[in-house]
Amino acid sequence: MQTDMKKDNLRRLAIPFKLQPVQRSVASGLTNADIQKAFQFFNRCETKLADVVSNVEQLREEGGATRSSPNLPEVMMLGRSNVGKSSLITALMSPLNNDYVGSNNKIKEFARSSSKSGFTQYLHYYNCGRKLKIIDTPGYGHASKEAHGNLVLRYLQMQKNLRRVYVLVDGYVGISPLDHEMFRILGANGIPWNIVLTKLDKHITKPGITKSSKSGTKQFLTEQDADVINGVVVNALQYVKTMSSTPDAEGGNGTVLEEVFGTCSHRRLNYMGIPELRASVLSTCGLL
Ligand SMILES: Nc1nc2c(ncn2[C@@H]2O[C@H](COP(=O)(O)OP(=O)(O)O)[C@@H](O)[C@H]2O)c(=O)[nH]1
Ligand SMILES: [Mg+2]
């Protein structure tokens, strides 16, 4: 029975069982029921690009909110250019079916992503089910412009409805000095934030075991690759814990949350971490 349950979990989530303990520990406080509920919410909710804010003046006119549904709770995705913000938002908001690995349905690209740096230039507010907004942002670093940076900074200073910032860090490249600067800014503005590691599929070095079932062909990781991915997530969590226990003099780390989400926004790693992130977003917005 126990073995059957394990097999069933493995099949349904289609990620190696070895990853489960890491996933549970990173998304602390979220139960399986929360994750299921959030999964269905984002699968079913109507999502639309509700507002695009292109300059600081526009922010000021609206007093830090947006014209449409100005009181909805907001979460923001921040990170370097090309780290995978728009792809992550697309995966979060797309109707992934329950057995989503091996599905041949290409997910609809809600938040446009590109391999070209600097593609997202403004603040893009996605309204999810008229309950919350997810904000896509221009990235910092390569190909970013000063005006984009100012827009994000002004938003952070003026925001009224922001509940949390998810700072995306490339899970293959690691944390950069620019990320540190962002952590400091978030701390200085009293905004709760946590790290989301992206593109963890880049650690896949070997094709794993392929299994076929009615719903398609699924790839499982090799044990070695799974160990590496687990290691990256655990290290990041350790890093955050150290940061949280030693807030710097300027209060830069005082608002960090001891949570790390290890993710992949592509099918290659079965949208790893996306269900947990969905639950986190709903919970953060007081909707779980
Ligand atoms: N391998 C891999 N590539 C990704 C992943 N997420 C995004 N990318 C790619 O990274 C590039 C930048 O993605 P995008 O979402 O536009 O990044 P943004 O600039 O932060 O919005 C695109 O070519 C994406 O296809 C992922 O999980 N794994
Ligand atoms: Mg983008």
Image (spheres, rainbow, N blue to C red):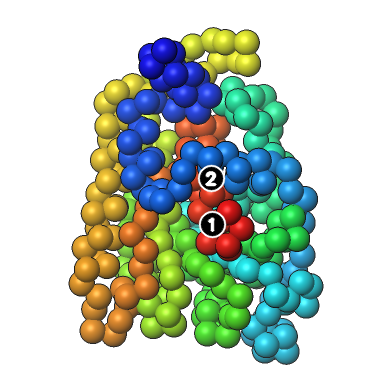
Q: Secondary structure at mark 1?
A: helix
Of residues 92 and 265, the one drawn nearer to the viewer in this rendering: 92
- Give the CA distance from mark 1 to mark 2: 8 Å
Answer yes or no: is residue 143 visible. no
Query: Left or right of 157: which side holds 63?
Result: right
Cβ atoms under marks 1 and 2 closer than 8 Å: yes
Residue depicted at x 42% and y 36%: 201
Q: Residues within 10 Å of mark 2 (few under 14, many from 20)?
A: some
Q: Residue 193: horizontal and vertical position, in percent?
A: 43, 66
Q: Which residue is mark 1?
A: 283
- Amino acid type of the residue that numbered disc 2 sits on in the rendered structure: Asp
Q: Split into 4 quadrants, where in the image is the N terminus?
A: top left
Of residues 154 and 140, the one drawn nearer to the viewer in this rendering: 154
Query: Left or right of 87: which side holds 55?
Result: right
The vertical placement of 13 against 166, above or below, is above
Residue depicted at x 62% and y 10%: 214
Q: Which residue is mark 2?
A: 34
Q: Secondary structure at mark 2?
A: helix
Quadrant in the rendering for residue 58: bottom right
* Label disc, if present, on residue 58 of the rendered structure: none
